[in-house]
Image: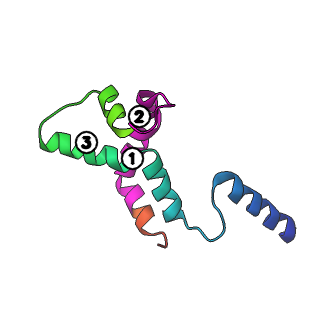
Amino acid sequence: LIRDFGKYLKQARQKYGYLEGTNIANIIEKQLYHKRVLPYIDLNLWLKATNKNLSQHKLAEILFADDTEINSTEKLRQQTIPLANRAITEEFIITLSSKPI
């Protein structure tokens, strides 16, 4: 039973990107970077501070300028914005800060 559970954990970690020797903070950081969450938050803060606006389409063009093989506006709407909204919650920040670095 223990051996089978160990095999299951190893397979699950590989499937979901939790490889041996990594920690949750590194995985979250990579997701936040890959999906342009942190640059999106920075850009939104700058837009609010300067009282300016950009359309989602323009934000997507800026954030995903190097990724021409995707529909950047849809990626922004479906992945980046929801993750950014979650990333700025107190619960998310507390959870992330409690993980080993």
Q: Residue at x 49, y 64 (%)?
A: 25
Q: Read off the magenta span.
A: 65-93
Q: Given contact means CB atoms under 8 Å apart, are the residues at marks 1 and 2 in contact?
A: no
Rendered view: 37 above or below 76: below
Q: Amino acid at mark 1?
A: Val
Rendered view: 48 above or below 7: above
Left or right, residue 43 beside residue 69: left
Secondary structure mainly formed by the magenta segment: helix
Q: Residue 37 bears which disc, if any?
A: 1
Label 2 and label 3: CA atoms lie apart by 13 Å
Q: Amino acid at mark 3?
A: Asn
User: What residue did someone put label 3 on?
Assistant: 44
Q: Amino acid at mark 2?
A: Leu
Q: Residue at x 48, y 69 (%)?
A: 99
Label 1, residues with CA under 10 Å away: few <14, some 14-19, many ≥20 = many
Q: Nearer the viewer, residue 12 or 71?
A: 71
Q: Nearer the viewer, residue 39 or 4?
A: 39
Q: Earlier in the sequence, mark 2 or mark 3?
A: 3
Label 3, residues with CA under 10 Å away: few <14, some 14-19, many ≥20 = some
Label 2, residues with CA under 10 Å away: few <14, some 14-19, many ≥20 = many
